[in-house]
Each structure stands twice: as C-alpha cells, then as structure tokens.
Image (cartoon, helix red, strand yellow):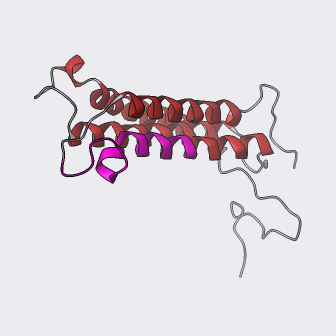
Amino acid sequence: MNRSENESPPLSDGAQPSSPGGNGEACLILGLLVALVGWALYLVGMRPQWFGLERAPGVGLVQLLILSVGWVIFAAGAYWSIAAMWPKGQPWPLRADIGARLLATGTVLVVLAALADVFGLGSHPWPLTPSFGPWQQAGVLIGQGVGFLGVLLMWPPKDISPPRS
C-alpha cells in the first residue's frame, strides 16, 4: 500500500503531532467569515432591539439559545482561522495548546452562564421564565475573557516559518 504525498507518516514514540492548521488563505478567510456570522448571531441574541427583533420585554429562552449558538460558532471560526495561520506540519507550542483549551473552556463558561436558568442552576429555575441577571452576565463576560485570552495565546508569532524539508 503506497502512501500519498499529502498523507503524513505515522507518529513514532516521542513524536509530536503537527498543528491542525496551515491550510492556506482560503481556510483563513472561511474561518473569519464563520467567526463573523457567529458574532452577528451572538449580537442578535444579546441585543435583539438593535436589529428590531425584540418581541417582548425581558430575556427569553430563544434569545439565550441564539446568544449561546452564536458564541459557539464564533469560537469555532476563531479557532479555524487561527489554526490556518500556523504552518502545516509544524507542531504547536504548549502556549497554543493551552490557548485552544482556554478558548474551549471560555465557550463552555459562556453557554453555561447564559443558560444557567434553563439548566436549573440559576435564580429562576424551570418552569419559571428564564432570566439573564447580573450573575449570568458576569459569567458570560468571564467566559468571553477566558476565550479571548485563549485566542491571544493561540496566535502565531510574527517570525514563524514553515519547517524545512
């Protein structure tokens, strides 16, 4: 069985896996577009009145779901676009691995904080109408901060170059 040129060789003991990125400008642009769509959805969920979409006073379940889904899509697009900036085949440093995990942790924090009442963890457990109070807002902001810190840690340095063949 012959291995194609694009297929990487199997890892031996002690070898590090290569980064998932390096797929070029198209993946970078697509990742940025996905992140932009996610951010737009997040804004619609956070502030529907900016878009003329507020149907009732207060915060409802659909609004919280749109906010959460928007953030998840934004985080996926951010990961995808930053991964595309790393040279293909070059292992990620520990800093970038920690950043990827922080981005995922921040995403979990945002979703849990936004949907705390739905999960029965907030001040208005089911079947009461969900609320988006100050503690949940603080949780979302903390999750966003953790996620943005992860993005900064994942960012490749300016002087990075592809590995030599």
Quadrant occupied by the N terminus: bottom right
Q: Position of residue 153 (x, y in %)?
A: 70, 34
In the image, 149: left or right of 8? left
Q: Confirm whether the magenta stretch covers residue 113.
A: yes
Vertical placement of 14 versus 153: above or below? below
Q: Position of residue 72 (x, y in %)?
A: 43, 43
Q: Position of residue 126 (x, y in %)?
A: 23, 51
**Quarter of the view holding residue 14:** bottom right
The residue sitting at the top extreme is 50
What span is colored magenta in the figure? 104-127
Foreground residue among 14 and 137: 137
Q: Position of residue 165 (x, y in %)?
A: 87, 50
The residue sitting at the front extreme is 123
In the image, 87: left or right of 32? right
Residue drawn 15% across the image and 20% down it? 52
Residue drawn 35% across the image and 32% down it? 42
Foreground residue among 119 and 143: 119
Q: Confirm whether the magenta stretch covers residue 109.
A: yes
The residue sitting at the left extreme is 55
Q: Count the marks.
A: 0
Foreground residue among 159 and 5: 159
